[in-house]
Each structure stands twice: as C-alpha cells, then as structure tokens.
C-alpha cells in the first residue's frame, strides 16, 4: 500500500518505529510528526524520521491520508476529538493504545462525516521510550489487534493492510474482549513485575542475578504511562489481579502445609503454559 501523507501524533518509541518502518519500506510519500515535546521532535528529525515536524496537532493532521495516534492511552480520545475537525473527509485515524473500550466509547458518533477511527493495538514495544529507541523492525512478525465498532469495512481493511505492510499479523476482536485479554497478558505482568521489584530492599540488590532482573524487567517502564493504562483498564485488571491472588494463595497454602506434591503440580502447570508460548 502507499500513504500519500502519514501523520504521526506522538513521536516516541512506537510512533518513531512506525516512521522508520514506513521510510524503510517506502510506504509513505510524506511523514508529518507532532509531539508536545520540542526535544522529542528534534530527536526524531535527527534520525530522519520526519519530513515535517510541528507542535500544532491540527496542522499535523490537516493534509493527512492516515493519522496514527501514539500519545498516552488516557489522552488518545481527547487528542483525536481535538483535531478531528481539522481532518479532510476520507482521512483514516487509528492508534496504538493498549486499552480500547474507553477510547471507542468516547469517540463513538463524535467524528466529522467521512473521518473514521479504527482502534489498533500493536503487541510490540519495550520498557524503553523515546524516538532514540525506535526500530524499523519493531512490528515484524508481531500481532496487531484491531477493535472496530461499526466502522466501514473498507476502513478496517485499509488499517489492517497498513499494519500488514509494516510486517505485522492482524487480528480483530471487540474492544471489551481486547481489554479483558490484555489485562492478563500485558497489564498484569507489568503490575506483578513492579510489585516484585518494589519488595526488594535496596541493600540486597547486589545479590540479584538473572532471574530477578529478567522477571522485573517490565518494572523499568514509564510509571506515568503505566498508571494511565492501569486506570483505563481498571475493571479488567482488577479481575486479573483477583485471579492472580487466588492462584498465589494456592502456592502459599501448599507451601504452608509442606505439600510437596501439590507444589510440584502447580509448578508443572506453570511450566506447561510457559513452554507452550514457544509453539506457533
């Protein structure tokens, strides 16, 4: 596919990676970047990501064929609403937010005629942030979930085709199902990593090795970004935390009772699921 003018609202890790991938694959005729941070725009421009950089979001989207919103998840609906009137009829909008239900509900029926928003969530990223950490291959082989709600089929296909052109696989599900699943597969792991890191006394850090550091890697992510994700997906994440607590209690009970056989079965269950993640 070819996008005459691509606008990226937020030129951090994901926005920058989209820009680099489009450059490498020659998917966009022109790339316009917006970011409230002049420093982020400068760093993105220094890496050759953008043909135009602006701190005016309405200017950034005014001539776009496709706009990808890569701002924090609690601001996506607000920013889309603020600049949608500046878009031309026929403009397609999507995002990279890791929660979907609240965004879709806020935007439903509020966009100008001819402007369509199709929610996206690329299951790709890193605990690192900023355009300096962006990679052109970030989406290669990764899954992108689309969450359309009554959108024109042509718009959904075009957004899916865009992600496929970046090397991703595409799957569609409802916003509610997406949030339920991602609460367990993405948001809960970050919460657990943060809890584990938070209970370590700093005087013991010299005794940590690969296991502790690998298990807590996610805790290095942006607290502000993850605060927003947790709150935007509060109901589903609370349910996931409840499931985690119940399973943790099974381990605690077996340990307290010295039940080696039950501990072995619980560990085998975890190993079975973890080993299955490497299967196609």
Image (cartoon, rainbow, N blue to C red):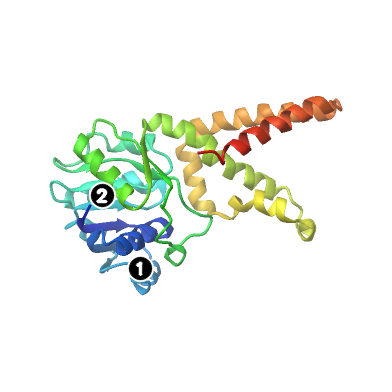
Per the image, label 1 sits on a secondary structure element best described as helix
Residue pictured at 42% horizontal, 58% vertical: 137
- Which residue is located at x 48 percent, y 37 percent? 182
Q: Position of residue 189 (x, y in %)?
A: 58, 42
Instruction: Decide if residue 97 is on the left or right side of residue 80.
Output: right
Name the residue at 25% across, 69% down.
51
Residue name at image x 50 percent, y 31 percent: 236
Q: Nearer the viewer, mark 1 or mark 2?
A: 1
Q: Is residue 2 above or below residue 89?
A: below
Residue neighbourhood size for the residue with mark 2, other residues' Cα within 10 Å, grouped as few (<14), some (14–19), many (≥20)? few
Please tell me in which quadrant of the rendered image residue 213 appears.
Answer: bottom right
Residue 217 lies left or right of residue 18; in this view the side is: right
Q: x, y (%) of residue 142?
A: 43, 47
> Looking at this rendering, what residue extends furthest in the bottom direction?
46
Left or right: where 3 falls relative to 229: left
Quadrant hosting residue 148: top left
Q: Which residue is mark 1?
A: 41
Tell me whether the residue at label 1 lies in contact with that at label 2, contact meaning CB atoms closer than 8 angstroms.
no
Whichever of callouts 1 and 2 sits on the residue coming sooner in the sequence is 1
Write down the residue under mark 2. Answer: 82
* Secondary element at image label 2: helix
Q: Position of residue 147 (x, y in %)?
A: 34, 35
How many callouts does the rendering have? 2
Could one spot residue 279 in this view of the protein?
A: yes
Q: Pick the residue in front: 205 or 86.
A: 205
Which of the pair 73/154 is nearer the observer? 154
Look at the picture and state if 110 lies above or below 203: above
């Amino acid at each position: 596919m070819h996008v005459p003018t691509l606008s990226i609202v937020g030129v951090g890790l994901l926005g920058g990676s989209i820009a680099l991938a489009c450059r490498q694959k020659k998917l966009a005729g022109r790339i316009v970047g917006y970011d409230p941070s002049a420093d982020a725009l400068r760093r993105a421009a220094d890496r050759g990501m953008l043909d135009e950089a602006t701190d005016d979001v309405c200017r950034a989207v005014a001539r776009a064929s496709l706009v990808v919103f890569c701002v924090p998840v609690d601001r996506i609906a607000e920013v889309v609403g603020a600049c949608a009137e500046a878009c031309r009829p026929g403009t397609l909008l999507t995002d990279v937010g890791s929660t979907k239900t609240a965004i879709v509900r806020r935007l439903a029926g509020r966009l100008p005629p001819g402007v369509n928003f199709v929610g996206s969530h690329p299951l790709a990223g890193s605990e690192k942030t900023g355009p300096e950490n962006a990679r052109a291959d970030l989406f290669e082989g990764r899954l992108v979930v689309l969450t359309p709600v009554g959108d024109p089929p042509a718009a959904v296909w075009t957004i899916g085709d865009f992600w496929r052109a970046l090397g991703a696989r595409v799957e569609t599900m409802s916003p509610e199902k997406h949030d339920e699943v991602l609460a367990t597969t993405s948001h809960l792991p970050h919460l657990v990593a943060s809890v584990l890191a938070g209970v370590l006394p700093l005087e013991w850090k010299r005794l940590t090795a690969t296991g502790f550091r690998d298990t807590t890697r996610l805790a290095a992510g942006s607290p502000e970004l993850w605060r927003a994700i947790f709150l935007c997906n509060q109901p589903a994440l609370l349910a996931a935390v409840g499931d985690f607590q119940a399973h943790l209690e099974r381990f605690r009970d077996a340990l307290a009772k010295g039940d080696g056989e039950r501990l072995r079965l619980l560990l085998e269950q975890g190993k079975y699921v973890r080993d299955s993640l490497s299967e196609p």
